[in-house]
Amino acid sequence: MKVTFTTKQKVGTADKMLYGHFLEHFHRQIYGGVYDPTSKFADEDGFRTDVIEALKRIKTPIIRWPGGCYVSAYDWKKGVGKKRRVNYDKAWEVEESNEFGTDEFIKLCRKIGCEPYICTNGGTGTAEEMSDWVEYCNLKDMGEYAKQRKENGYEEPHNVKYWSVGNENWGIHEIGEKDSNEWGNLVREASKMMVRVDPTIELSAASIVDLDWNIKLLTKAGPYLDWLSIHSYWEWGPDGLKNHDYKELMLLTGEEIVSNIDRVRAYLKALGYENKIKIAYDEWNLRGWYHPNSNMPMTTDERRKINEEFYEKEVLEQRNKNDINETYTMTDAVFSAAFLNTCLRNCDIVKMACFSPVVNTRGAIFTHKDGLVFRPQYFVFELYSNLLKDTVLKTWSENVPTMNGKINNKERTVDTVDIAITYGDGEYAVAATNKDPENEQTVEFDTLDGNVSMMRIHTLNGPSTESYNDIDRTEVGITVSEWVPFDGKATLAPHSVNVIELK
């Protein structure tokens, strides 16, 4: 295939927050993940230093917390101060110690060097409780909650810039589900109170790719909002493991991703907010989290059958399947790269994306008592966050190879080679993914600026599409070529993620 580009034709500026992450009180993400005072890697505050260093290595720009479904019944006031109040977590049906709360989250972000992004309780919470949380974090000394923060040992404000009203409150699975009218009203009133506490914050609201929902939300609360929050997971295995093969999942990397962005863009444009409100894809992953018999409606008879053994075996123990490392292969890496490439090509409106989650469950990092496993997705972030430039260029492609097939009873055709071209400081960095499971693909680059003489390729790959990393097993990683004279072409290995440097 041939790709033509010039620095004179730009999509826009790619925000570093596209490489963000998400953290929720579910399974081992917090306790035993980022926070584990019993670990040999724990620092003086109980945080795992190996996790912190891994997140620094991929230049984590922002982390969204505390949920997720968890936040829709979360009382933030139980998680601050010297005496924490234990409660039953109704989202995930476990006891929550509240040992990790707002101040610990801020401290974690400061250690990593990233922005904190707090998602508020739009389920059982009220507009006043949300604005109290802003007061606790951002006011210097006025008000009950700013004074409480100071009494808790934090003299200076936390200065949290990014806030979201709610999480997936459009869904029956969520505590505090709302209809579109209810939601628009709550977001308007919550936003009104939150910005009265701190007018410098940026506000997001939980949304879905639905016309009625967005019309009501934007009509009622649009003047207060800076972001719309949308979520997507594409693979929902019935056993928590694998449901589709590599090629089938590659068929999800085209229309299935971009159509969500296109539709939300259309809603914003139709209501006059395209240049004011941005898209935050603040939960995304190929694989949806596995938590059977939880968060789902049941009849009374079904509930009566849940005894202690069923709860332990069919609810809690099932969540361990999220952490079987062989589930996460080059398939996940190639899909993740294709998703980020789509965001880059839409960087004029998609300014934030948070991989869900960052540690354990479906995360890019797996923790165990003796260290970490970097799953294949981790290396996508290492390549993109460290190598890609800020300006995304428009491209014109010819003779693009395609893949065809059926998934979810639909015929799909996607480009075999997925490309996003970035530019900065007089150099290009090309994100190039080859989805073909077996064959190399050659790309010819026509730089109309005519200013390229050298090339180097960073390649993320493994021996097969099913290659994975685990404790004492490393099949997937990055290799880097030498700088070589640029002849206008680059060869991409099968099932690979690449960043090509051109200078």
Image (cartoon, rainbow, N blue to C red):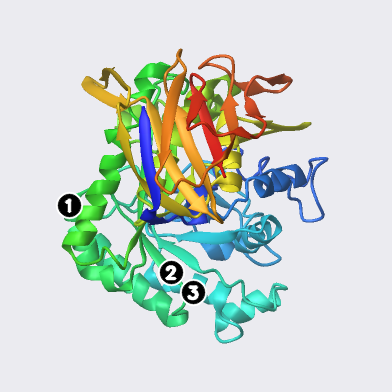
Q: 66 above or below 377?
A: below
List x then y, in percent, for residue 128: 41, 74
Crowdedness near tag 1: few (<14), some (14–19) or many (≥20) residues, C-alpha within 10 Å: few
Residue at image position (79%, 40%) is: 39
Q: What residue would you read off at disc 3?
A: 132
Q: Quadrant of the N terminus?
A: top left
The earlier-in-sequence mark between 1 and 3 is 3
Residue 330 appears in the figure: yes
Per the image, label 1 sits on a secondary structure element best described as helix
The kind of residue tagged 1 is Leu
What residue do we see at 54% from left, 25% from top? 328
User: Is residue 247 found left or right of 384 in the rendered image?
Assistant: left
Q: Which mark is residue 211?
A: 1
Residue 339 screen position, x and y as percent? 41, 38
- The image shows residue 455, relative to residue 91, as above or below, that is above
Viewer-nearest of discs 1 and 3: 1
Q: What residue type is disc 3 on?
A: Asp
As measured in the structure, the alpha-carbon distance from the residue carrying label 3 to the one carrying label 2 is: 16 Å
Q: How far across and down, in percent of the image, does residue 458 sit?
A: 60, 33
- Considering the numbered disc 2 on the image, is that residue within a helix, a strand or a loop? strand
Residue 185 found in image quarter: bottom left
Quadrant of the frame with the C terminus:
top right
Q: In this rendered view, identify the residue nearer to me: 329 or 73.
A: 329
The answer to whether residue 301 is above or below residue 438 is below
The disc placed on residue 202 is 2
Q: Earlier in the sequence, mark 2 or mark 1?
A: 2
Question: Of residues 125 and 59, which is closer to you in this image?
Answer: 59
